[in-house]
Amino acid sequence: MSSLVSIIIPCFNAAETIDRALRACLSQSYGHLEIILVDNNCTDATVTKAENTLSGCGYPWQVIPCTKQGVNHARNTGFRASHGQYVQWLDSDDQMSSNKIAKQVHALESSDAADIAYCDWDWCFHLNPAAADQQFSELTRMVLGAVYGERRWTRHGPGGQLAVQHFKLNQYDDYLLRLLEDKWVPPVAYLMRRSIAEALAAHGLWDPTIRLATDRQYFSSAALLGAEFRYVGGVLAVYNAWSSGQTTLGARDTERAASLAKIFQKLRSLSVGARLTRDHLFLLAQNFRQYVNVPQGEVQLEDLSTDSQLSVATCAEIERILSRYSQPATLERHAKIIASSSPRLWGQHLSIMRYLDRLQRAGRLVPADNEESIPQ
């Protein structure tokens, strides 16, 4: 018999999207599934719609309650109720191609060394019909979490209300480094062995005490614990973004920085004993304080291009970009803003971070005066 795959779907007031997510599950060409929907205190018609869609579907399914509010409480509740040899995390508004689970199970079962499969994905941003043109223009300039994609948005659907960015991935020799650089992939794009999910659960992941970037913590922790990631082509995951009201899009920078500080503190604790490179260690040690630029003439600069892997001309370009804005930001966010401002710096996250680190140590970037307390 084929290995069982548990699809775990946390839900909070997802009546408008749950049917699409469930139909993506029911359309899978892989036939040995269980669907676990976790009702995280829904007050709308989510549960009724889900039960109507799943009724008579032919797969075992259940709707279970989780009264502790929060998506990670719901994920943990769903995992405890699951039985599959493989785990598919699925948010209640995301989708996947009909061959995704079948091809990813095949890839994992064809290699004892592979623990987590991942695939290409689309970021679909649903624009407000009344302001679609303005929102699309703003979207193309935004510095988003997954800043190192193709950086090309296209519009689809009636009135161009759907903006899509496609992320074509590959097999990467050092997937941990990509995760530490925040070359982000959404949970829907992964399929994992249960043994890895159990190991992560034993370390308190998904962590209910952290509200933002918890999937970054989860999959980075998996890599630090030794999980091997395998790319599977020819399948697609769809990550939907609806509005600034979503948790990740509506968060303040200070709140995001505080969450990342806690996350990286946890990652450093998990890294003890792991075989890490100099680059891994550098990114793991980064802090998430807010920094602002100061005029160059106020400090005596050393040769800041040394050890940055960037030319002097490229470093000068970074300086010019920094001089254009004065908003406080973490070094990581500064790096993303810089990369998004220059085609030749696109994707050079590690090198930019090394240069910014030297700027910070030279006094060129200083902590913001109004910085909220962020534990390091």
Image (tube, rainbow, N blue to C red):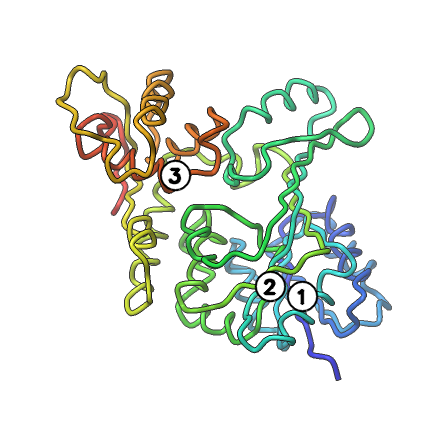
Q: Which of marks 2 and 1 is nearer the N terminus?
A: 1
Residue at mark 3: 255
Residue at mark 2: 117
Above or below residue 266? Residue 348 is above
Mark 2 is surrounded, within 10 Å at the Cα level, by few (under 14), some (14 to 19) or many (20 or more) other residues, namely many
| Residue at image point 80% right, 63% down | 54
Q: Quadrant of residue 275?
A: bottom left
Q: Quadrant of residue 354?
A: top left
Q: Which amino acid does label 1 sit on?
A: Gln
Tell me the element at label 2.
Answer: strand
Mark 3 is surrounded, within 10 Å at the Cα level, by few (under 14), some (14 to 19) or many (20 or more) other residues, namely some
Quadrant of the frame with the N terminus:
bottom right
Mark 1 is surrounded, within 10 Å at the Cα level, by few (under 14), some (14 to 19) or many (20 or more) other residues, namely many
The image shows a total of numbered marks equal to 3
| Residue at image point 35% right, 39% down | 351
| Residue at image point 36% right, 22% down | 317
- CA gap, disc 3 to disc 1? 35 Å
Q: Earlier in the sequence, mark 3 or mark 1?
A: 1
Residue 328 placement (x, y as % from top left): 33, 26
Q: State if disc 2 and disc 3 touch (CB < 8 Å).
A: no
Q: In which quarter of the image is residue 271?
A: bottom left
- CA gap, disc 3 to disc 2? 31 Å
Q: Which residue lies furthest to the bottom in this view?
A: 1
Tell me the element at label 3.
Answer: helix
| Viewer-nearest residue: 22 or 326 | 326
Q: Which residue lies furthest to the right in this view?
A: 56
Q: What residue type is labelled 2?
A: Ala
Disc marking residue 104: 1
Q: State if disc 1 and disc 2 touch (CB < 8 Å).
A: yes
- CA gap, disc 2 to disc 1? 6 Å
Tell me the element at label 1.
Answer: helix
Left of 145 or right of it: where is 12?
right
